[in-house]
Image: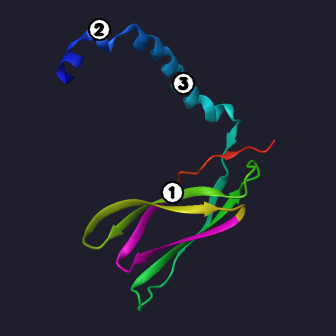
Amino acid sequence: MFASYFASPQKLWSPIRLARTPGILLAIGLAATTPAAAGPTCKPALTFTEVRFSETQFETMQRQWTALLLVDASRCATASGRFAIMFTRQKEGAPEYDFAEPFVWKPGLTEVSVDFWADEVVEGYRLTGIAACPCRD
């Protein structure tokens, strides 16, 4: 019975199924445009102002990478949001490795930090995944 259902084209393409197809496509189209209809979105401007590596802590054999970011969220109606920093890490005896660390911004100066092992170096870093925020009127 199962095989005969798929072997019979009239059951797959019945008039009732064809009549439902435009409604389904319309619903998918409306769902895809709903966020745009909610209003314009903005993004805060994040700028690195200072980046530093701490000395190795011999108890843990780790160093801390710390950055200060200046956050201009004057266009945003929200007081915080998410973003990530994409790191390229080099480690002794291992291939380069890219990874992202998530953070939360707040207007003004935001400090972020990530721990690295003593034999790791940050080859590069960049901002990514800055979440959009509702715009101020």
User: What amino acid is labelled 1 in the image?
Assistant: Arg
* Outermost residue to the right: 137
Q: Which mark is residue 16?
A: none
Start and end of the magenta stretch? 109-127
Q: Which amino acid, mark 3?
A: Ala
- The residue at the point 43 percent across, 68 percent down is 122
Query: Where does the image place residue 37, in percent across and percent down from the top left?
Result: 67, 31
| Tag 1 secondary structure | strand
Write down the residue under mark 2. Answer: 10
Question: What amino acid type should be assigned to the residue bearing mark 2?
Answer: Gln
Left or right of 115 in this view: 29 = right
Using the numbered discs, state the Cα–Cα distance from disc 1 to disc 3 in whole angstroms. 38 Å
Q: Earlier in the sequence, mark 1 or mark 3?
A: 3
Residue 126: assigned label: 1
- Is residue 118 part of the magenta span, yes or no? yes
Choose mark 1 or mark 2, whichever is in front: 2
Q: Secondary structure at mark 2?
A: helix
Asked if residue 112 is positioned above or below residue 1 in the image, the reply reads: below
Q: Mark 2 packing: few (<14 Cα in 10 Å), some, or many (20+)?
A: few
Nearer to me, 125 or 17: 17
Query: Is there a contact, CB below 8 Å, between mark 1 and mark 2?
Result: no
Residue shown at 38% from the left, 65% from the top = 89
Taking depth in this image into account, of 117 and 15 the one nearest to the observer is 15
The residue indicated by pointer 3 is 27
**Distance from Cα at disc 1 to Cα at disc 2:** 56 Å
Name the side, left or right, on which 108 lies relative to 48.
right
Residue 59: % across, % down: 41, 92
Query: Which mark lies nearer to you, 1 or 3?
Result: 3
Crowdedness near tag 1: few (<14), some (14–19) or many (≥20) residues, C-alpha within 10 Å: few
Residue 62 quadrant: bottom left
Q: Quadrant of the N terminus?
A: top left
